[in-house]
Image: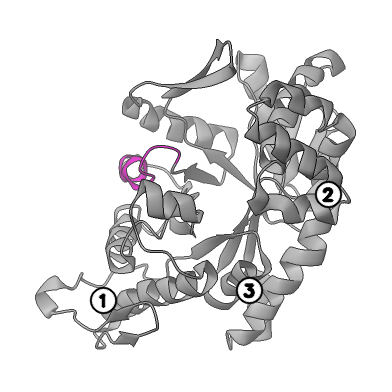
């Protein structure tokens, strides 16, 4: 058994409202109503398997509603948005929701935020857009200012370039609570957003499309740069949590693993075709492949992407291996990460037992 590093293990809530359906143009996502009634069972299953955190993502559901339900299930498991899109909501409205989720969960909530890209903010939500890193810095400062006001009673007065908030009548303030220190994590890819995360947050949620080289050469230096600007004592850096930072593919046998690798390569190729993640490809020397993938995506030639994004490339961005070696592969790829999102298909009791053992091993020191 490997004893090099202990991870926190994260699992995403699954609402069963998306599946893929084959069509002439490839795979199409089909939406059905979410299965909210499954949430209590999912909380119980995650507890039994040994997970530390349940994540609720904003694709496409509102990420806060499921956590309201999950917070009412007796459990010690942590709850987090992974992530909620910030710039579609007022920072004060977000502060209200997070404060109440922290109270409802008995202090188990982490607020994970992300900015999203300009097209979604302006065209899908019809909300204003400006330099995203600076906007997110002020957004987070407003959220935390609201929390301080509610807990301490100090006047609310925030004057920024983007946000100005100076009204919080006593009748509109939320009451203080037993667990006021809500961890706030920011999704970040580029250097400026990483620095904002280090400066204003208690953790960062790195993208799934990430290599170890990116974490070591881009993410960590910029997070530390921001942290140094925060004025916090140096020793508090040890508590700063890094989550995400790669993908995982595993199966019982090499034959079964090949199917998982193909699915993984499809996801990675999609991200690699996107300009927002070009830094990940350039850093690994895959600039030419990124251009090819971007061209294929513009022409809707999705099925041809696997000929460009090879299995060898996939190993740069993911921990890949059969069950007997995957723990060591995860420890290597995620060497600088604190919390890893890990799951696998669970078809029977044997699969449940295997996953429980893998989680136990990953959490051991």
Judging by the rendered image, the residue that carries numbered circle 2 is 287
Mark 2 Cα within 10 Å, few/some/many (few <14, many 20+)? some
Q: Position of residue 264 (x, y in %)?
A: 72, 30
Q: Is residue 61 magenta?
A: yes
Judging by the rendered image, the residue that carries numbered circle 3 is 195
* Horizontal side of residue 174 vs 255, given as left or right: left
Q: Position of residue 76 (x, y in %)?
A: 45, 47
Q: Is residue 109 depicted above or below 315 in this figure?
A: below
Quarter residue 25 falls in: top right
Residues 193 and 223: in front is: 193
Task: Mark yes or no: residue 244 visible.
Answer: no
Q: Is residue 263 magenta?
A: no
Residues at marks 3 and 1 touching, judged by CB atoms closer than 8 Å: no
Identify the colour scheme used: one colour
Judging by the rendered image, the residue that carries numbered circle 1 is 150
Residues 299 and 277: in front is: 299
The residue that appears at 83% across and 49% down in the rendered structure is 287
Query: What element does badge 3 sit on?
Result: helix
Alpha-carbon distance for marks 1 and 2? Answer: 49 Å
Q: Earlier in the sequence, mark 3 or mark 1?
A: 1
* Horizontal side of residue 277 vs 46, given as left or right: right
Mark 1 Cα within 10 Å, few/some/many (few <14, many 20+)? many
Mark 3 vs mark 1: in front: 3
Mark 1 vs mark 2: in front: 2
Query: What element does badge 2 sit on?
Result: helix
Q: Where the N terminus falls, by quadrant?
A: top right
Magenta-drawn segment: 59-69
Q: Position of residue 103 (x, y in %)?
A: 30, 59
Query: What element does badge 1 sit on?
Result: helix
């Amino acid at each position: 058994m490997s004893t090099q590093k202990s991870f926190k293990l994260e699992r995403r809530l699954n609402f069963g409202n998306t599946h893929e359906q084959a069509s002439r143009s490839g795979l199409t996502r089909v939406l059905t109503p979410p299965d909210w009634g499954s949430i209590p069972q999912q909380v119980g299953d995650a507890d039994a398997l040994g997970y530390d955190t349940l994540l609720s993502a904003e694709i496409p559901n509102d990420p806060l509603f499921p956590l309201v339900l999950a917070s009412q299930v007796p459990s010690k498991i942590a709850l987090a948005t992974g992530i909620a899109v910030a710039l579609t909501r007022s920072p004060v409205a977000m502060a209200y929701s997070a404060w109440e989720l922290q109270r409802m969960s008995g202090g188990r909530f982490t607020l994970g935020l992300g900015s999203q890209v300009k097209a979604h903010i302006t065209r899908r939500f019809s909300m204003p857009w400006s330099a995203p890193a600076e906007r997110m810095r002020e957004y987070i400062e407003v959220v935390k200012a609201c929390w301080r006001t509610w807990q301490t009673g100090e006047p609310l007065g925030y004057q920024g370039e983007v946000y100005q908030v100076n009204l919080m009548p006593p009748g509109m303030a939320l009451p203080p609570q037993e667990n006021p220190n809500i961890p706030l994590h920011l999704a970040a890819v580029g250097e400026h957003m990483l620095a904002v995360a280090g400066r204003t947050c208690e953790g960062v949620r790195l993208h799934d499309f990430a290599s170890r080289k990116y974490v070591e050469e881009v993410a960590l230096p910029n997070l530390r740069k921001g942290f140094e600007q925060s004025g916090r004592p140096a020793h508090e850096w040890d508590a700063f949590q890094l989550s995400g930072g790669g993908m995982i593919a595993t199966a019982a046998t090499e034959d079964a693993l090949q199917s998982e690798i193909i699915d993984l390569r499809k996801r990675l190729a999609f991200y690699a075709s996107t300009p927002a993640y070009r830094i990940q490809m350039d850093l690994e020397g895959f600039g030419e492949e990124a251009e090819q993938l971007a061209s294929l995506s513009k022409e809707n030639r999705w099925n041809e992407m696997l000929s460009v994004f090879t299995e060898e490339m996939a190993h740069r961005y993911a921990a890949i291996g059969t069950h007997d070696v995957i723990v060591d592969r995860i420890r290597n790829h995620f060497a600088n990460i604190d919390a890893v999102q890990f799951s696998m298909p669970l078809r029977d009791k044997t699969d449940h037992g295997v996953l429980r053992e893998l989680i136990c091993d990953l959490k051991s020191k």
